[in-house]
Amino acid sequence: MFARRFTAGALLLLCVAAANAKDLYTGKDAVLVERLNQMNFHTHIKKPDSMNHVKLIEFYTNDCASCKSFESEYVSLAKQLHRIVKVTAVDCGKEKKICDEYGVSSYPTLKVIPPGGFGTQDYSGERNAKAIYSWTLKFHSHFVEKVTADNLDAFLNKGAGKFKALLFTDKGKTPLMWRGLSVDLKGKMELGVVQKEEKGVTSRFKVSKFPTILVVKPGQKKPIKFEDKMEYSELFEFLNRYQETFAMENAAADEELAQKKPWLSEAVPQLTSLSAQDICYGGDAVCVIVAAKPTGEGKLPKDLYDVVMAAKGKYSTGNAKLTFMWVDADKEKGFCSALTMEGAPAMAVLRTGKRTRYARSEAEVTSEGMGSFLDRVLGGDVQYKPLKEGPPALTEIKEEAKDDKKKKK
């Protein structure tokens, strides 16, 4: 009887411990490590636009001691590979079906899905960020072209009328960040690398400092130079400005439009009375709107920008027609109130067209909260509320009269 009582008590303690086990990869870590579940697993792993990416998956349980001790190493690895490799995790305590499908029987288990999305490779080395980093990058391929004086013109003339990006470097190897960008921009923009020793190319573009990044194309009066921090998100936003929206035949028209309507080239544009028609009201996409208090420079705070960019990378391509933007919660109180987005930061989706309607998220604006909300939106599991008068009014902003400015000069 004592043995039976002891066994029952031990089982009860185990159940309580399992129930109280802290969820791994939550909060800020969720921006770096994407938690996959039955609802989003195949969408994110198999979606067409991610076929060129390497996906790293950790299968774990929250009550596994080895998984807990490995968490900090995996987060460190995710920071190093951020935007280069899709670093993900599956909680086998909640997602048994996925784990069974991949033959997982011990934890933590690490698997890589190479570019192409077919088959997996199991990791069997040491469980530290350095070793896994080297192993994972063996599967990484890129689309950066080595540009020399001999092939420069051929490179520039690829895809007539489209911009290309050149990285001038004094490093022997192409930087990982540039290789990662070539994967994200595959089929959209050609990326090249020019070594310092290629005097014929460096002199043509008058480059003397390294690294230097230029956006170029034939017929252009002057190359466009990247002037911001050498960070992935900054570079992606800069290159994204020219990869599609401004891929017209007339380079001068491209640059003029970029100045006139900057929101067309911004990764996360601000929703205003001037931009609304272009980024939300004029299309058939679902507008994902984050209401936030701006920084002193009038921009979306970086922590929220990172959350939106992470979601954009997962949801804005393929079959999902989502567009991402933010609205100034201080200036647009009426708009936010109409979408019940008081208490910024907050988020909602807005659909326009024959019937204008919205759905407000009750979750916090975190990577996990936004991901969960958008999974429900795409799965048809949100209840929309009608806006019978159409989209709520935004504070009117008058366009500056550029012709008058020129006359004053």
Image (spheres, helix red, strand yellow):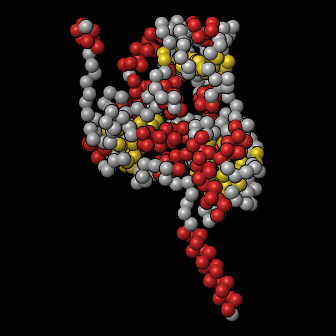
Q: Which quadrant does the C terminus fall into?
A: top left
Q: Position of residue 377 (x, y in %)?
A: 49, 47
Q: Which quadrant does the N terminus fall into?
A: bottom right
Quadrant in the rendering for residue 21: bottom right
Where 200 falls versus 167 (above or below)? above
Camera-side residue of 123 and 212 = 212
Q: Position of residue 156 (x, y in %)?
A: 61, 11
Residue 254 can be seen in this image: yes
Q: Position of residue 358 (x, y in %)?
A: 39, 45
Where 297 falls versus 343 (above or below)? above
Rendered residue at 29%/46% (across/down): 337
- Give the farthest residue toward the bottom: 1
Quadrant in the rendering for residue 205: top right
Where 302 falls versus 225 (above or below)? below
Q: Is residue 327 left or right of residue 90?
A: left
Residue 39 can be seen in this image: no
Rendered residue at 53%/32% (across/down): 232
Labels in figure, total: 0
Camera-side residue of 171 and 403 = 171
Rendered residue at 56%/70% (across/down): 19
Q: Position of residue 157 (x, y in %)?
A: 62, 10
Rendered residue at 25%/30% (across/down): 396
